[in-house]
Image (cartoon, rainbow, N blue to C red):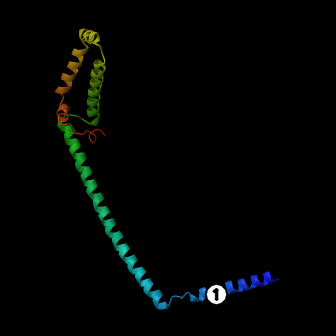
């Protein structure tokens, strides 16, 4: 029974302390509410104006990017015209021929001295030299002397 009495007393004390804490929490007055509302509205206006300014900057940068891409495309067309290439497929074909020669030369580096002599007797080395001479005569080779990037030309 004493235990029950102690439990009832503790429960009552706990309930009273919860009520006291709830009453101790002060409610916001209407003036405080309006002040916080004005502050939040002010912060919202600042955020909106900042967002608008950033969106304008983004639009401006996108326009600049578009203009630069047009200039790059015009330069790519001028370069293709200057080297006599009808389109980027001609440049890709030229680069493919160069790659094939590089592969042939790399394969020759793996040969023994006897195999190199045999390749020379078969005319393999002269054939590679003739291919290189032919590619050097092409105006596209002038672009390669300064090692430009053909990425924009061959898309």
In the rendered image, residue 48, in percent from the top left (x then y), is placed at 37, 73
State the count of labels. 1
Q: Residue at x 19, y 35 (%)?
A: 143
Q: Quadrant of residue 6?
A: bottom right
Q: Residue at x 27, y 31 (%)?
A: 95
Residue 83 to residue 49: above or below: above
Left or right for 34, reference 15: left
Residue 140 to residue 101: above or below: below
For the C terminus, the image quarter is top left
Left or right for 66, reference 137: right
Viewer-nearest residue: 128 or 60: 128
Q: Residue furthest right?
A: 1
In the rendered image, residue 134, in percent from the top left (x then y), is placed at 19, 23
Residue 53 to residue 87: above or below: below
For the N terminus, the image quarter is bottom right
Left or right for 108, reference 32: left
Q: Quadrant of residue 44?
A: bottom left
In the rendered image, residue 74, in percent from the top left (x then y), is placed at 22, 46
Q: Residue at x 29, y 22 (%)?
A: 106
Q: Residues within 10 Å of mark 1 (few under 14, many from 20)?
A: few
Q: Residue at x 31, y 66 (%)?
A: 56
Q: Quadrant of residue 59?
A: bottom left
Element type at marker 1?
helix
Which residue lies under the disc numbered 1? 19
Left or right for 125, reference 1: left
Viewer-nearest residue: 92 or 149: 149
């Amino acid at each position: 029974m004493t235990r029950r009495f102690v439990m009832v007393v503790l429960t009552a004390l706990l309930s009273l302390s919860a009520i006291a804490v709830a009453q101790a929490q002060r409610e916001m007055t209407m003036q405080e509410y309006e002040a916080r509302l004005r502050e939040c509205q002010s912060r919202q206006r600042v955020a909106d104006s900042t967002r608008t300014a950033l969106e304008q900057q983004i639009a401006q940068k996108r326009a600049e990017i578009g203009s630069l891409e047009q200039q790059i495309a015009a330069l790519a067309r001028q370069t293709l015209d200057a080297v006599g290439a009808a389109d980027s497929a001609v440049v890709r074909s030229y680069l493919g021929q160069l790659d094939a020669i590089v592969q042939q030369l790399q394969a020759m580096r793996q040969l023994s001295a006897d195999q190199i002599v045999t390749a020379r007797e078969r005319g393999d080395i002269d054939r590679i030299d003739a291919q290189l001479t032919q590619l050097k005569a092409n105006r596209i080779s002038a672009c390669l002397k300064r090692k430009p990037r053909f990425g924009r030309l061959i898309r």
